[in-house]
Amino acid sequence: MAHGRRFIARLRNLLTNERVEQELAREVASHLALLADDFEREGMAREEAQLAARRAYGGVEQAKQAHRDERSVLWIEQTVQDLRYGLRTLRMSPGFTITAVFTLALGIGACTAIFSLVNAVLIRSLPYGDPGRLVYLYTPLPQFHLPPEVFSPTYADFYDLKKDCHSFEDMTMFGQSVFSLAWQGTAERVSTARVDGDFFQTFQATPELGRTISADDNQLGHDRVAVISHALWQSMFGSASDILRRSLVLDGKSYQIVGVMPPGLEYPHNTDLAYGESQYKTTQVWVPLALTPKQMADRDNANASVVARLKLGVSLAQAQAEMAATMARLDKLHDPQMRGWGALIESFVDSTVGHVRRLLWLLLGAVAIVLLIACGNAANLLLARAAGRMRELGVRVALGAGRSRIIRQLITESLLIGLTGGAIGVAFAYLFLRILPLFNPGNIPRLNEASLDTHVLLFTVGVSLLTSLLTGILPALAVSRINLTDFLATTSSRSVAGAHTRVQGALIVAESALVVVLLASAGLFIRSYINVESVDTGFSQSTVTVNIGLDPRYGHPQAVAFFRNFFARLQALPGVEAVGAVSNLPLSNSDDLRMFAVEGYPNQKTQLAEARWVTPNYFSAMRIPLIAGRLFAADEKPGAHTILINQSFAKKYFAGRNAIGGRVTRQDDHAQWNTVVGVIGDVRNNSLEEPAEPQIYEPDMEFAGGNIAILSSLPASSLAATIRAVLHSLDASLAAGDVRTMGDLESAATAQRRFQTSLLTVFAAIALFLALVGLYGLMAYSVSRRSREVGIRMALGAQRSDVLALILGKAALLLGLGLASGLIASWFATRAIQAFLFGVDRHDPITILSVCALLEVSGLIAAIIPARRAASIDPMQALRSE
Amino acid sequence: MKKTPIQILQGTLDLMILRTLATMGPQHAYGIASRLQQVSGDALNLNQGTIYPALVRIEQHGWTRGSWGKTENNREAKYYGITKAGLLALDEETERWRQMAGVVEKLLAKEQ
């Protein structure tokens, strides 16, 4: 009961309008004063009169309460009335209702879907305590002209920073490895983080079971412990309760399982670290980093990432200043050849989602445009209907319904439409989220966690309300301008309808303009995507690659022998054309950058090339063409110091001279010169969107594990099965990781483009569809309004073709105005998408022409149905009908 | 015979207020209440505050329009004036009341 009373009290508060309350108090006071005045006039003393006034008035609070009750009862009553009336009128015109609801549902659904993405990726907090205080630390060395994120602190610098910087609460260093995890006679490749004792504390991550990795575990000799992910615990151990008494075998070594992390904690993900392990989406195992004292004192090498948590109240800039000062001091401890180490602190959250923020806001902008167009359409429908209902509304005004009451009625109707549209929109968004994983470009963190949570639903409700107001406001304003005497005098709604048609026309122009902006953007995205797809990668798409690493049971000679045998077995398979190996596959986000010097060239200290070790057959396995000279021979002598370079290298460093026979050395030891024996085709190693860098290939005559490339005429899936079978027959405990075709890698490299292009294109298509529906609706409406006029024209001798031209001309005019303003808007708006374009100018004439043609043609097609209806009007009937 | 104050029949207060306003022009709540008491010769059991819900109801129907003004004694007061819709409603309500009263009257006459 108490609940019920509180609910009523709250409802009443909601209904209690402050202004009305004040006025009531004022009125009661005035009433009492007047009463008292009269009593005083009858001879009472002032105070006595006031008392008498109160008596005569009765309970002041009761009176106020009665006033309130009456007010709110009426409010509720009227709302119920409005709702009932609204539902009835909406039911009476199902065509209108369905169109309006469906239009808004499309707009709201698109908005909800994209917002749920934004919510999952940008808004929902990362599960690491207070993630806003987490930062990455880098120590960039500017002389290399490389992105600063390449330079994580060296081991020795890390320990000094940790000791000397007081801006941080915690600081951790961790590396990444891919291990073969042996399990029941087979093996699986798992991404593993090697972490120091502060890793879990820095991330404020507590285990679901057991404990995390401590500083003691990082002591050499005590480091055979592992923490596993919830997913691994489930998939491999079936959520066994005795998990803490079990162990894992990683690369042939046994690790005691000491803890299980909760679901969702799988840091680092492949999207987290700019230069991290990129082949595995999540980390499944954490083991101690366990550095040797020698490593801990190493000031030249860095093979780990550093994350720290800022102390409460310390800003990023303060921490940056402190770290810079510390690094300036530490710089002097470095090799004199390698000085100038800087300090850079980057927000963890920005690093995690920064690269997709722009894209997501862009998509949200696109769906906002779709929603605006949907609102325009719904407003147009409501306007058309309001014009048809002028008589009804006019009569209601004449009968004493206040203007505010009529406006409220109309807003109630648009609210009904908007909220129903919102509900259906949520269903659309749900469907969208079901198919979203198919589009997942793989580099948007937490994309698959997008869901319709409370945030999203609140957003949808807000958007639906806003939409209802936007669509309801124009008709409501139009109605509130009804001039009663004019209306009653003319007994016709023509004059008002004329004004409406102009507003409706303006809405269509605005809608088409917005569509032009979306179409132009989508067109530019499509052109960019085509450009990227047509880039020559330099390698064959059908080559199958696999990653195989041996565990420590194999010494180097055994490993070399193992792979010679393995390659021979593969090579002997029918259909296999070539088997090669490489240190880093193209487009796999991993590269060795090498400083070098070229004989007879004015060398810069910091010139860099992408360097790869390859087996002689690698080029045929990848179908990388030989341009000049020769490839590595099957028995290339390592002592011969031969190398191959790519065309870009030759063009830049051997311009105007023959590269073959030219000599190249690593910059750090001029002692050893390598001779160029051949020039091969450029390969896009990093990205399809940047030109190929200078590349160097060295022969790997003792391949002992890594990436293997196989060219064959077999289908990729059957080849993969064969590779696994061959590997299993040689050693059952080895795992074949990452079996992919080069086409898969290329596809992954263009995935984000595909994602953004398909989404934007879908939104542009929805927008175009909505605008066409709007145009069709307006033309059909105006034809029905003008049937009398058309009848007169025809009676006076106008041909059907004239009528057709009249209606189509009007549609063309609206479209033309929309196109013109849309093109002007696009001219400026496309600046927002400049950064997303590839190989196409944002004012690309082909795109603009196609957009114009598409809009004009589809617009005229939409208009031709009502135009033909107008042309088929029977003049006699039209004239008689009124 | 001792006069016992009568209770107001549901809905009749609205009618009485409309009638008062139609006859006397715009009035404040006190004026309306005084007029009702005066006409009824104290037969009505009417606390002056009792008329407020009726005033709200009538105003929300659009039958009256309120505005603030000064009394002759220079006190501020909210004046209620009847609207066209109010006049229409008054006619309707009056007609309905007459019919109702007629029916009741006839019934009572027969029973006697």
Image (tube, coloured by chain):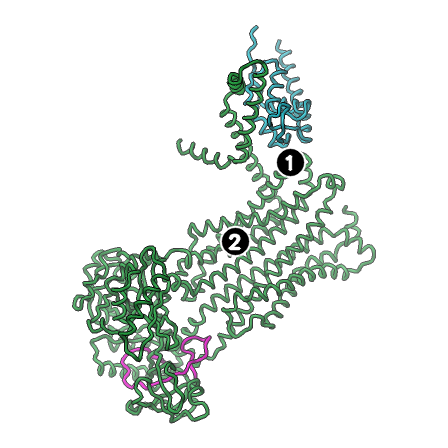
Residue holding disc 1: A401
A72 lies above or below A249: above
| Colour for chain A in the figure | green
Q: Residue A34: where, in percent of width, then height?
A: 58, 22
Q: Residues within 10 Å of mark 2 (few under 14, many from 20)?
A: many
Quarter-of-image position of residue B42 = top right
| Badge 2: chain ID | A
Depth order, front residue of A337/A429: A337
Q: Position of residue A832 (x, y in %)?
A: 52, 65
Q: Quadrant of the N terminus of chain B?
A: top right
- Kindly identify which numbered label has been placed on residue A831: none
Q: Is residue A508 above or below residue A335?
A: above
Q: Nearer the viewer, residue A682 or A711?
A: A682
Q: Say yes or no: labels 1 and 2 on the same chain.
A: yes
Residue occupied by mark 2: A108
Residue at the (66%, 20%) spot, across then down? B99
Q: Amino acid at mark 2?
A: Ile
Q: Position of residue A280 (x, y in %)?
A: 34, 68
Question: At label 1, which amino acid type do we have?
Answer: Ala
Q: Please report the bounds of the magenta region as a residue range.
A: A682-711
Is A683 magenta? The answer is yes
Q: Which chain is cyan?
A: B
Query: N-terminal of the two: label 1 or label 2?
Result: 2
